[in-house]
Image: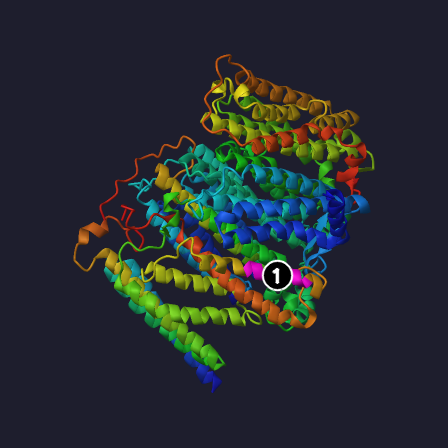
Amino acid sequence: MTISLVVDIGLALVVLSLALWIIAATTVYRAVIGFIVYGLLLAIVWVRLGAADVALTEAALGGGLTGLLLLGAAARLSHHECVPVFGRPAAGPVVGFRLLVGILCTLIAAGLAAVVLLLPEPAPSLASEVASNLPATGVGNPVTAVLLAYRAIDTLLEAVVLVPAMIGVWSLATDQGWSGRPGFLTPARRTSALTLLAQVLPPVGIVFGIHLFWIGADHPGGKFQAAVVLAAMWALVLLAGLREPPRVGSPPLRLAVVVGPLVFIGIGVSGIWLADAFLAYPAGYAKPMILAIEAVLTLSITVALVFLLAGPPAADRSADGRR
Amino acid sequence: MSALLDGFTVVAVSLGALFFLAGTLGLLRFPDTLARLHALSAADNLGLGLVVLGLLPQVASPLGWIGLIAVWLLALLASGTVSQLLAGAVRPLDGAETQARDNPAEGPFS
Amino acid sequence: MPLYPLVSGLLTGLVDLGGTLLVIPLMLPVTGLLLILAIGGRYAGRIVLALLPLGLAAAAAVVAAVWETGDALSYQLGGWTPRLGVALKADGLSAVLLLTSAIVILAVGVYAQRPFRVPQGLSETRTSLVFWLLFCGVWGGLNLVFVSQDLFNLFVALELLTFSAVPLVSLDGRGETIAAALRYLLFALLGSVLYLLGAVLFYGTYGTLDIALLADQIARVNPLPAAVIAAAALMTAGLLAKTALFPLHLWLPPAHAGAPPAASALLSALVVKASFFLILRIWFDLMPVLLTQMGAQVLGALGVAAILYGGLLALRQGRLKLLVAYSTLAQLGYLFLVFPLAIGPGAARSASLVAAPGVLTGGMLQLVSHAFAKAAMFMAAGMIAAALGQDQIRKLAGIGRALPITVLAFGIGGLALTGLLPSGAYLAKTLLDGAAAESGQWWWSLAMQAGGLLTAAYLIRVFYHALSGFGEPPVLRARPARYQELVVLGLALCSILLGLLPSAMLALPELGRVAAVVTETP
Amino acid sequence: MNGATLFGLCGAGLIGLGLYGLICHPGALRKVLAFNLIGSGVFLLFGAIARRGGGVLSSAGTGIDSDPVPQALVITGLVVAFAATAIAVALLLRLAETTGRTTLDPNGSDPAPPAGRKEA
């Protein structure tokens, strides 16, 4: 029972109890608060698992942006949801059904736990293969090598998947609201504290984001984490009301979202002639190409994430009598 | 020399932990939101400062020092802003107490 | 105009590309998607119109390449071999499905030019940009699902498909279509998370995600480890949720009936088939030993339940689109009869048995003919609903004389579903019946006959109303364009004439599949 | 019982909890929260598997002692999960705006009429 095991057990128990809180909380607002704390604790769990890149992503994306999204949703929904007076949750399915589902879920969890315990002892792993092929990719960080060299198709499709997701959010606008500005991040009233934060933090955040992207080649970091930090800064500025949310139809921003995947496809297709395989990099030029792709992808993912956060375009504020 | 530094680290970090404990006690015991806010922001920021101070000798490269101090400064900035926002939600500057209290979800997004 | 040498020159040029050919069907729709967002909604229709023939040519070239070499076409992305890299592989199954989806997407793309064109004054409308962009997203997701050989890559393909299909359902912005889209999204996300969990367990046991490598390792170990059985069960359950098989079908009817006609044609004909195709991959390529287990019988039973449930509920529907959506539920049931018939309890006792050949071809024929027929029926139903302003079956009187070609197309599609003589479904049913008789499982063919009767029943109900009425034909609000009607009729004819394929072509789905030698587990 | 297996069990528990929440909670936003729980449970399981297979790499001198392939897949999965949450949130907010319903049950009757809007 080494000290690190005790810490791990404590961490696991806290994470599980937070998950229980998220499920059992009476109002959705409390559940979302619990979820944000859960996301940040999960980042520490990823550090304990030796996965620094994932810890960065989980903290920024799981705890941060998802929390922002859900908090905004919970605040908006509180006008519609029937706030249970004495803590009894809204009329859910009958208790017997819940019991049945509870038993089913505990069986699934127990089965999975048993499977985890029965995993083969010499754990199969690609770590050695990744390490031996690392010099060929010219990149020091093995995770970036997997993301951009060995399994480049997944990362390309990742950046492409964000486009239909963004369009899915846009499609929920009303037809006359199509030319308006997305409404989720516009503040009800401007507070001086938030304005101060939105003026002081973004410069630091942008420098940190670019640093995170730059060191991504050789140390934990990379384009996803950098894009999330930059998107968070932009969202903060929008939340403080310093800037108007970006219009859906603005050509430069649409090009920004598209340029990342397009450059990636261009380099991939050029690989067919230069390095005799789609998404392959010519021998000496792997690292500069990977950095070029990462730079453009960071830009595209940042803009896509902000559009995802900003929500569907709503009719212009003046026409919208809700405020 | 390193034994002295290690000793300093242990002392500083445990002091920091003590302040966190005080902050949490304040959170549990104090009657209303504003008092809790005060306890939390005061104790936790000081506790974090002590922990960062204690960890400084453990970190070799100067870049690491900058990183640790940046963590502390950003945490200060964040907790300051959040305390302002929460206090503003509980008791808006214009003193109208009742309106905000029964609609906790007002917050920055209406 | 020397069209034939031009086309054959293009085909041979493409076929000589060998493995690189597989990249074209992937990158074409993805580039289209990005260009539409960059250039904007006004030219979206034309961009798609330009890409459609290229996509069809690429799919035809893949079929030609697989047909010529008699073996699967494979390609290592980035030059990395599969344990590290991701491989693409197009065997007979993928080639058939690539071609089918290319044809259906060409028809839907041409049909949708009119409803989603941008009126003169505007630079872009919400529906036109959203539809055309998600159209390319669905097309790209489908091609990747049919061609990829890596489990996580297939997960990303499923997500691309889900994120492109869900917003199509709530395109008209009404309350109930948004609720239908949200329910569809939750079911689809639960499905893909369970699928991902299965992939994680496979990686935890064998350290790779490539289907071919996993199949080798699974074939060697005799009592399957618990993690592998759990992974297969989780993946199948997740994919069943996405295929909307009987107990998990709640989301399909409101979603497919609520979507605009062109979108519901895509959803019913192709998107639902992608997750079914993955179940085929898992059960026939990854773990053929599963076929001898009880699981295959359970899938067959669920298929029969879907046939009966879908058929009976289609009989009771008041709206035409809901009737066609419930008929999708029923027709999906047929596809799941492939699993129990592949080995069959009787035949499994022999030491080792190659999966019964006719069954896979029968399943493919049923899938292809349903894709053509259902796309045609949904588009025809859309035109009828647009013309009359409503799609109540009782109020369809006289539409037969008002829109003759549309109702004819709907009728031919319906007949193709029931499995009349020249149709692909007829050939599929004979093959499946033969396999059922050979393996002594008469009850599956009984279920197929019952399904055929139910399909005929709810179609006759529609024709009774549509072709009746002696008064003057109803006043039409919006008359569909002639080319739209001809495209839908062409698609329906494709389905009805599928049975006339030369028998040599029927061997196509079997090509390139490593002979699934199934040893009876002790 | 080392750290990796412990977090694997924690992941299995999260999946069970999330599944219960997804099925039993009527509220749409609660279902989205539960879906995120299941997602993080699956990724945690993948992380535990990565940690088990990691020992080799630390000897290779890169200092990170967990298998990089699952890490890359989890990062991609996290971004996909965020995109899914964004679409789900946009859908359920639009549903609440158009029909005032925050739940998905087919009979669609919200237990209480939406709380009157306070004049901000």
Split into 4 quadrants, where in the image is the N terminus of chain C?
Answer: top right
Relative image position of residue A149 (x, y in whole percent):
64, 64
Split into 4 quadrants, where in the image is the C terminus of chain C?
Answer: top right
Q: Nearer the viewer, residue B26 or C64?
A: C64
Q: Nearer the viewer, residue C267 or A34?
A: C267
Q: Which residue is mark 1?
A: A266
Left or right of A260 on screen, residue C440? right
Left or right of D20 on screen, residue C373? right
Total marks placed: 1
| A266 lies above or below C491 | below
Badge 1 marks a residue whose secondary structure is helix
Left or right of C141 on screen, residue A319? left
The reply to whether residue D33 is in sight is: no
Which chain contains the residue that carries disc 1?
A
| D99 lies above or below A151 | above
The reply to whether residue B24 is in sight is: yes
Q: Hey, what amino acid is under mark 1?
A: Gly
Magenta span has C250? no
Res B49 → quadrant = bottom left
The residue segment tinted magenta is: A260-271
Task: Point out the residue furthest to the left here.
Answer: B95
Q: Main secondary structure of the magenta part?
A: helix
Magenta span has A262? yes
Relative image position of residue C108 (x, y in whole percent):
58, 38
Q: Nearer the viewer, residue D29 or A281?
A: A281
Say few, some or many: other residues with alpha carbon within 10 Å of mark 1 (under 14 / 14 to 19 / 20 or more). few
Residue at x-position 26% and y-position 61% = A191
Residue at x-position 63% and y-position 39% = C276
Residue at x-position 60% and y-position 28% = C330
Relative image position of residue A299 (x, y in whole percent):
49, 63
Relative image position of residue C233 (x, y in whole percent):
63, 41
